[in-house]
Amino acid sequence: MPDDFPTEGVLLGIDFGTKRVGVAVSDMYQRYSSPLRNYDRQSKQADEHFFRTQALEFRPVGIVVGLPVHMSGEESQKSREARAYAQWLSRLLQLPVAFQDERFTSAFAEAILLQTDFSRKQRKARVDKLAAQILLQCFLDARRQAVERSENLPHADREPDSLTDGDLTTHPAVEPIEDTTSPTQADPSQG
């Protein structure tokens, strides 16, 4: 993984689920995100084909994966599964991955969809890709705000900013992937 996360180019946003994955995409300038689609996970080969097809179509430069954490901020079993899935995606697409706290993204997505005329079935079909859009937009906004804050500080007083100085490990919204899987663990691409 590169030392810094790309600041220009399309990003994929991933709302990880064991059965379904919501996918969103950013614009080239990383200002806006749009819901793309939901993907019902299948076999490893089908999952690989789906994501390679998305990569060919959108030419992403990075992936932002939602990290499900407890209200306390502590990681859960789902967090570990999301990290393993992100690592699998990173290897598959040869792209860097960043993580975004996804607390409340599905709840926000459901609240938005409740304001529509969609049926319950139609809302359920849209919630994951909307959650992916929300988490990707939160990532984009947080990073842009951090850069703006650092630009407003006098240069001599400016502390290193993880987004402009290439150290993503200190930024709360971006975490590097660590290889925590062992050869005996199950394939994370399987639901």
Image: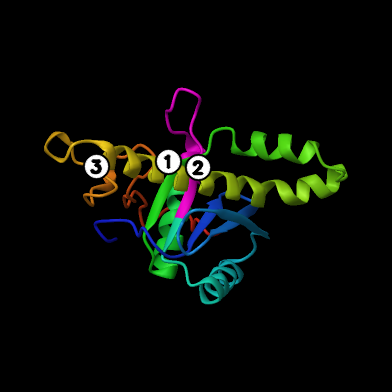
Is residue 126 found left or right of 33 in the rendered image? right
Q: Amino acid at mark 1?
A: Ala
Query: Is residue 17 something that shows in the picture?
Result: no
Magenta stretch: includes residue 74:
yes
Where disc 1 sits, the SS reads helix
Dot 3 amino acid type: Asp
Q: Earlier in the sequence, mark 2 or mark 3?
A: 2
Residue 150 - label: none
Residue drawn 31% across and 50% down?
A: 178
Question: Residue 139 location, x and y as percent?
Answer: 46, 45
Q: Give the CA separation, mark 2 to mark 1.
A: 6 Å
Distance CA(mark 3)–CA(mark 1): 13 Å
Q: Identify the secondary structure beneath mark 3.
A: loop
Say which residue appears at 35% left-offset and 53% top-offset: 182
Residue at image coords 82%, 42%:
116
Q: Secondary structure at mark 2?
A: helix
Region rendered in magenta: 64-81
**Who is closer to the viewer here, 7 or 181?**
7
User: Neighbour class for label 1 at 10 Å: few (<14), some, many (≥20)?
Assistant: some
Q: Are marks 2 and 1 in contact (CB under 8 Å)?
A: yes
Q: Which residue is mark 2?
A: 138
> Quick check: is 79 in the magenta stretch?
yes
* Amino acid type, label 2: Cys
Q: Position of residue 183 (x, y in %)?
A: 36, 58
Mark sitting on residue 142: 1
